[in-house]
């Protein structure tokens, strides 16, 4: 297969905006804070890279994803099993926002001959996935911002499935129907579009309850698995700040349902849901 070449994801950073004091000897003899140095850097136009453009984001995600998202492995398993059970022996697949390549890796365990076109806008994620699958000639990686659409990446209009996991909630709302329409055009008849992702609750009250419940559970997980001590308010503030920094824009499952329908999909289903995580599947017919 030849292509014309042209990711609720969160990570832990215990020191986000908590700036320890240190001494700058030989300057004033006084103790300065890192906060002051940060302000100097900002005034000079030197800003810390944030979001998925920063290489550290990939490493921290790799280290903490299964702790922060304990259901992640189940989501990966469901997506991969649907693809291999409902599609042909050697399927052609697109992995949207492939990240570290975990969805593709699960699919390849079950169907080693699958051909996968992996897309991500992060150069670091592309680099890591390229290294991970360097010996697999059936894997093609392309750097692409999903906000730009995907219809022009290949002339092939016969893909068996398009999959995505913890990626589409980063796409701007106004670009999502166009993205889903592109997916529709790239799929063969009866092809599948499967998205496991972060969603928000429709009810603000339920959403707040869900967040608080997750924070309480996460405090225990971080202490047991990473030895980190957090207060409820400290961790909640950290999660909300991190979601903003990483560009999280989750919609509701109902919004995705209507957007997929608007893109042309005849059948749209919610296959699985746990708190603010869900798997949506759409079929072209």
Image (cartoon, helix red, strand yellow):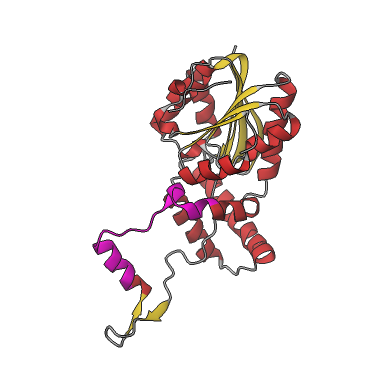
Image position, residue 141 (x, y; %): 53, 33
**Quarter of the image containing the N terminus?**
top right
**In magenta stretch: residue 47:** yes
**Residue 18 visible in image:** yes
**In magenta stretch: residue 77:** no
Question: Is 232 positioned to the left or the right of 143 in the image?
Answer: right
Question: Is 279 positioned to the left or the right of 182 in the image?
Answer: right
By secondary structure, the bulk of the magenta-drawn segment is best described as helix
Image position, residue 233 (x, y; %): 51, 64
Question: Is 214 positioned to the left or the right of 108 in the image?
Answer: left
**Quarter of the image containing the C terminus?**
top right
Image-quadrant location for residue 146: top left
The span picked out in magenta is 36-58
Image position, residue 245 (x, y; %): 42, 52
154 to 136, vertically: above or below:
above
The residue lying toward the viewer, choosing from 192 and 108, is 108
User: Which residue lies at the image location 67% right of the left edge and 45% below the top edge?
Assistant: 71
Image position, residue 127 (x, y; %): 52, 44
User: Which residue lies at the image location 32% right of the left edge and 71% below the top edge?
Assistant: 37
| Number of numbered discs overlaid on the protein picture | 0
The residue lying toward the viewer, choosing from 132 and 207, is 132
User: Which residue lies at the image location 53% right of the left edge and 16% below the top edge?
Assistant: 156
User: Which residue lies at the image location 46% right of the left edge and 40% below the top edge?
Assistant: 170
**Residue 246 visible in image:** no
26 to 103, vertically: above or below:
below
Image-quadrant location for residue 138: top right
């Amino acid at each position: 297969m030849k292509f014309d070449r042209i990711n609720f994801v969160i990570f832990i950073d215990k020191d986000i905006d908590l700036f320890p004091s240190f001494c700058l000897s030989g300057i004033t003899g006084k103790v300065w804070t890192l906060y002051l140095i940060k302000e100097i850097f900002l005034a000079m136009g030197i800003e810390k890279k944030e979001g998925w453009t920063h290489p550290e984001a990939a490493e921290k995600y790799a280290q903490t994803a299964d702790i922060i998202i304990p259901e992640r492995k189940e989501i990966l398993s469901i997506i991969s099993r649907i693809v291999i059970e409902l599609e042909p022996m050697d399927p052609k697949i697109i992995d949207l926002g492939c990240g570290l390549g975990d969805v593709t890796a699960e699919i390849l365990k079950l169907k080693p001959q699958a051909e996968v076109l992996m897309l991500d806008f992060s150069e670091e994620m592309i680099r890591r996935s390229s290294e991970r699958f360097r010996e697999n000639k059936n894997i093609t990686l392309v750097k692409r911002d999903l906000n730009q659409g995907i219809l022009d990446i290949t002339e092939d209009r016969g893909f068996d499935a398009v999959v995505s996991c913890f990626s589409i909630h980063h796409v701007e709302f106004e670009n999502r129907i166009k993205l889903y329409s592109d997916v529709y055009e790239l799929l063969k008849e009866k092809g599948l579009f499967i998205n496991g992702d972060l969603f928000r609750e429709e009810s603000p009250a339920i959403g707040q309850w869900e967040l608080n419940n997750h924070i309480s559970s996460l405090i225990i997980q971080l202490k047991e698995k990473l030895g980190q001590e957090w207060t409820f308010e400290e961790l909640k503030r950290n999660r909300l700040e991190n979601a903003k920094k990483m560009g999280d824009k989750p919609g509701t499952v109902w919004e995705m349902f209507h957007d997929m329908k608007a893109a042309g999909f005849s059948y749209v289903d919610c296959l699985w849901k746990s708190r603010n995580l869900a798997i949506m599947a759409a079929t072209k017919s």
